Amino acid sequence: MASTISLLPEKHFLCSLCRDIFTSPVTIPCGHSFCLSCLCRYWSRHQSKYCPHCKRLFTDRPDLNVNRILAEVSDNYRRTRPQKPPDEDVVIDVQQMIQERIQKIERLKYSLEVQKNSYLREVRESQKVFSALVIAMEKSHKAVIAEIEERQREEEKRVETLVKELKQEIQELRREIAESDPQIPANGDQSDEKKPVILMKDWSTVTIDTDPCIRVTRRALSDVMEIIKIEVNRLSKSELKRIEKYAVDVNLSAKTAHPVLSVSDDRKHVRHTDKLQEVPDHPQRFDRVANVLAKESFDSGRCYWEVEVAEKIEWNLGVVRQSTNRKGKFTVCPANGFWTLSLKAGGQYIANTSPVTLLALQQRPRKVGVFLDYAEGHVSFYCAESGVHIYTFTDVFTDKLHPFFSPGRLHGGKNAAPLIICSGFCSI
């Protein structure tokens, strides 16, 4: 078998990533094979899980199991590998490098075309959205003017009626004066015949409001704001669908977890145990606050992950600067390297700015999506079920950032459920 293997071209036994004979080879669904360690490193550096050779994109990360047959064949080939002149290896490497660069040029050109289409799509979308808003605002403005003009006409009619009544009463009073006999003394005898009493309106309570348009414009603008809010939520849902392609695999780092936290074996669950566990005093471990970080860190590109919070009544999520303080007491805020969103035990959602920013959420999220755009300096939070944007931090990042998790205190068992990092997402 060894002699037969040695007759095969060497390319069948080479990993295209390290350009060496396979070590613990894995075969992914598209049929291409790579060294297990090479593929894991490649996927950890890139934002999406796709084949390095054919670029086929996988929605979920494929299970990586060593191809035992290919591993055995590769090991046999390594032992019987024919020796080649040193300069031949150099020629092969150079040709491979040339080919890789040619392919890279083609991918860059293709990516630029895709990017241009994205720009055009965004411009068209913005034109559509803002045109609709302008029309809505103009319609609302016309409605305000119409309401004001209608109120003015009604007030003019009312004043005209009041003036007419006043003039009529003035005429009646003047007629009364004219019909009176000025020669009769005030204490003189009068006829037993009584004159009819003239009934007059009490004009002291009749007024005209000189500022009748209070709240009119503000109410109309509130209606426009509601339209804008609906449109923002629609765009947010569309935005989140596009963000999901930047999903990354996130795993908890047990060595950073506070001693009261229990991290599951699969590194996806963390819960508060209310009991100090015997753990090594690692320099990266939080020792005062019940926090834990992901082992993954990001210093470029875009990354997205989701965390199930379900019915928990307290939690804290976001990203943390790698060099931030993990010992003693500290304030969770951007100045200290924390960009996080919290639910407090009283039901209040806050962005941990300084001072904190109170947030009013119409829907209680059961899953929270966290999106990091390192280059743009954005950390955004979404309600994963509805797609509604919750809050975005804007800053300048200069250090590696780790996903951050805090399941909150137990509160008598009411908050015992774990935080769960979701490995698969359902599109909204």
Image: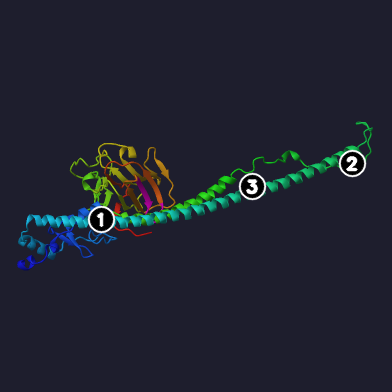
Which circle's residue, 3 or 2, is located before the other in the chain?
A: 3
Instruction: State the extent of the magenta-drawn residues as a range.
Output: 378-388
Q: Residues within 10 Å of mark 2 (few under 14, many from 20)?
A: few
Q: Which mark is residue 148?
A: 3
Categorize mark 3 by other alpha carbons within 10 Å: few (<14), some (14-19), many (20+). some
Give 293 or 258, whichever is nearer the viewer.
293
Q: Is residue 386 magenta?
A: yes
Number of numbered discs visible in the structure rendering: 3
In the image, 48 versus 254, the foreground residue is: 48
Closer to the eye: label 1 or 2: 1
Amino acid of disc 2: Lys
* Inter-mark Cα distance, 3 to 2: 48 Å
User: Please, what is the three-letter code of the amino acid marked with disc 3?
Assistant: Ile
Q: Which residue appears at 79% of the width and 44% of the height?
A: 165
Residue 200 appears in view: no
Q: Please tell me in which quadrant of the rendered image residue 186 appears.
A: top right
Q: Position of residue 99 (x, y in %)?
A: 21, 58
Residue at 54 percent of width and 53 percent of height = 135
The quarter of the rendered structure image containing the N terminus is bottom left
Asked if residue 372 lies in the magenta stretch, the reply is: no
User: Disc number at residue 104?
Assistant: 1
- Rate crowding at label 1 as few (under 14), some (14 to 19) or many (20 or more) other CA atoms within 10 Å: few
